[in-house]
C-alpha cells in the first residue's frame, strides 16, 4: 500500500491516471502468468499421459505379435488335424456306414389321429383382395363410391 492509496487527493485527477493504469497492467500480468503456469501444469500432465500411452502401445504390439504367432501355430495344427480326419474318414467310412445300417432303428410312418375335435385338420386359408371377398370390383374413381 502506498501513500497515494491512503490520501486520495494525491492520486491525481481524470480518467487516465498513470498509477491506476500501471496497477491494472500489473494485475493483468499476474493473471496471465497464473494462466501460463496452469497451462504448463496441464502440458506436463498431458506429456506424462502420452508417455504412458506409448508404453502401453509397445506392450500391446508385443502381445499382438505373440498372438499372431500362436494363431499361425494353431492354424497349422488345425490343418494337420483336418488332413488326419479326412484320411480316417476315407479309411473307416465304409465300416462306419455298415455299422450304422446294421444298428438302424426302423420306425413305421406315423399317422395323426384327427378324430378329436381339437385335432381336426385345417384347410389352407383363402386369401383374396378385399373387393373380391366383398364381391365388388376395384375402385377406379376414388371420388365415386358404388
Image (cartoon, grey):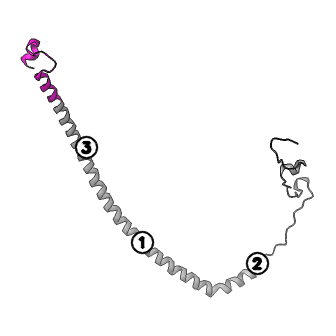
The image position of residue 104, as x and y in percent, is 76, 78
Q: Earlier in the sequence, mark 3 or mark 2?
A: 3
Q: CA distance from mark 1 to mark 3?
A: 42 Å
The picture quadrant where one finds residue 122 is bottom right
Q: Which residues are magenta?
A: 1-27
- In screen coordinates, is 38 left or right of 78? left
Q: Residue at x 89, y 56 (%)?
A: 120
Q: What secondary structure is marked by label 2?
A: loop
The residue mark sitting in front, 3 or 2, is 3
- In screen coordinates, is 79 left or right of 16? right
Name the residue that disc number 3 marks: 42
Q: Is residue 12 magenta?
A: yes
In the rendered image, the vertical position of residue 66 relative to residue 10, given as above or below: below
Name the residue that disc number 2 marks: 104
The one nearer the camera, 103 or 32, is: 32
Check disc 1: other Cα within 10 Å, few if <14, some if 14-19, many if 20+. few
Name the residue that disc number 1 marks: 70
The one nearer the camera, 53 or 127, is: 127
Q: Residue at x 25, y 50 (%)?
A: 47
In the rendered image, the vertical position of residue 85 relative to residue 24, given as above or below: below
Asked if labels 1 and 2 touch by Cβ distance under 8 angstroms, the answer is no
The residue mark sitting in front, 1 or 3, is 3
* Residue lying furthest right: 115
Amino acid at each position: 500500500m502506498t501513500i497515494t492509496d491512503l490520501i486520495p487527493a494525491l492520486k491525481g485527477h481524470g480518467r487516465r491516471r498513470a498509477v491506476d493504469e500501471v496497477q491494472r497492467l500489473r494485475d493483468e500480468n499476474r493473471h496471465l502468468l497464473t494462466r501460463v503456469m496452469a497451462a504448463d501444469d496441464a502440458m506436463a500432465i498431458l506429456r506424462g499421459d502420452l508417455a504412458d500411452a506409448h508404453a502401453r502401445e509397445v506392450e500391446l504390439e508385443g502381445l499382438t505379435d505373440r498372438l499372431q504367432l500362436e494363431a499361425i501355430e494353431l492354424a497349422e495344427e488345425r490343418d494337420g488335424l483336418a488332413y488326419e480326419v479326412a484320411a480316417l474318414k476315407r479309411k473307416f467310412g465304409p465300416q462306419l456306414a455298415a455299422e450304422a445300417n446294421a444298428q438302424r432303428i426302423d420306425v413305421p410312418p406315423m399317422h395323426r389321429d384327427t378324430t378329436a375335435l381339437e385335432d381336426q385338420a385345417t384347410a389352407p386359408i383363402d386369401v383374396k383382395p378385399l373387393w373380391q371377398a366383398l364381391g365388388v370390383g376395384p375402385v377406379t374413381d376414388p371420388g365415386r363410391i358404388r
